[in-house]
Image (tube, helix red, strand yellow):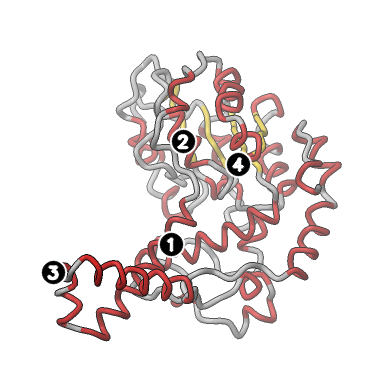
Amino acid sequence: MPPSARLPDFIVVGAAKSGTTSLYQLLRRHPDLFLPDIKEPEYFARDDRYSAGIESYAANFADARDDQLVGECSTIYTLSPFFPHAARRAAEHVPDAKIIYLLRQPVDRAYSFYVQIIKNYQNVTSDLSVHRTFEDFIDPTRLASAAPRSKVFSKANDHLPDEPDLCLAGSDYLLQANAWLQHFPRDQILFLKFEDFVGDRPTTVGTITDFLGISRLPDEIFDASGVTRNVAANHFRRRGQERVINRIGQRFGFLWSLRHVLPEGLKTTLKTRIVRSFSADNRHVPPKMLPATKASLTKRFKAQQIELDSITGLDTSSWWK
């Protein structure tokens, strides 16, 4: 690798569905930081990308100025055991890098990860149906007879395994944190809560910039628009509208193309019927997890609280109230 090539000074390692996209967008606005256009290079986790060589990874940071800190954000770095080499490989290439890890209430995060998989599938296909429930993903007995992978995963998710722990492993924070603590000293890892980030972005990002040893972002940055928020809800709302409009278009054919020349009164009536039809058709929306599932997962992850708080220095008791 050329002597002038840059590698990360810090890495946001996860967790998926814990605000990392919003954090990435905010950190990119800091003049002292450089994060690549590709949010998740995933170099240290994926064998196919790691085998391409460190030069291919360094190319992501080629445009960084000499006076900037370089970072990246790849959430599958905390998806062990499916990507077990991420922390070790990172330690080999960037042993002095600072590690930032956002944690979210684990049951909510697991379900949100499932929703993201469904959303990704709908985004790249014309199929707006939901072919698996959350329980189909996490229960081995149900997964065996569930809809095939081709009806659930998008091409962008080809690297993800179709296994029962896929949605749950990322919420096993003890497993994930210990994987990184095996290779990085504790003082190089900053653990934060997603809920604190959502509730007070300036303070949480300020903790991060203090950790990195740079100035804090000005308050007006946080008032600006463009930071990703409830993307999933917006996605399913749009997909629902598309579903209804497509169905009406198929039913009325050429007449549907003339809707723009209708009198305003008829347009209003038509819009009302579309909205009513949309409200009644939720086949494109992932079903909520069953109460029994939530109770079981709550028991599983709540058992980690004391040890997790000790390792991370966080107080996660609010997750269970």
Q: Position of residue 230 (x, y in %)?
A: 50, 49
Q: First in sequence: mark 3 or mark 1?
A: 1
Q: In 3D space, how far apart are the residues under numbered discs 4 and 3 (Cα atoms)?
A: 63 Å
Residue 286 vertical position relative to residue 312 in the rendered view, above or below = below
Q: First in sequence: mark 2 or mark 3?
A: 2
Instruction: Please name which of the two marks, 4 or 2, marks the residue nearer to the observer.
Output: 2
Q: Residue 141's quadrant in the figure?
A: bottom right
Q: Secondary structure at mark 2?
A: helix
Residue 24 numbered tag: 2
Residue 88 numbered tag: 4
10 Å crowding of disc 2: few (<14), some (14-19), many (20+): many
Q: Please indicate whether residue 265 sits to the left or right of residue 163 in the image.
A: left
Residue 261 numbered tag: 3
Q: Amino acid at mark 1?
A: Arg
Q: Label 1, on which residue?
A: 237
Residue 159 vertical position relative to residue 318 in the rendered view, above or below = below
Q: Are marks 2 and 1 in contact (CB under 8 Å)?
A: no
Quadrant of the frame with the N terminus: top left
| Label total for image | 4
Residue 57 vertical position relative to residue 247 in the rendered view, above or below = above
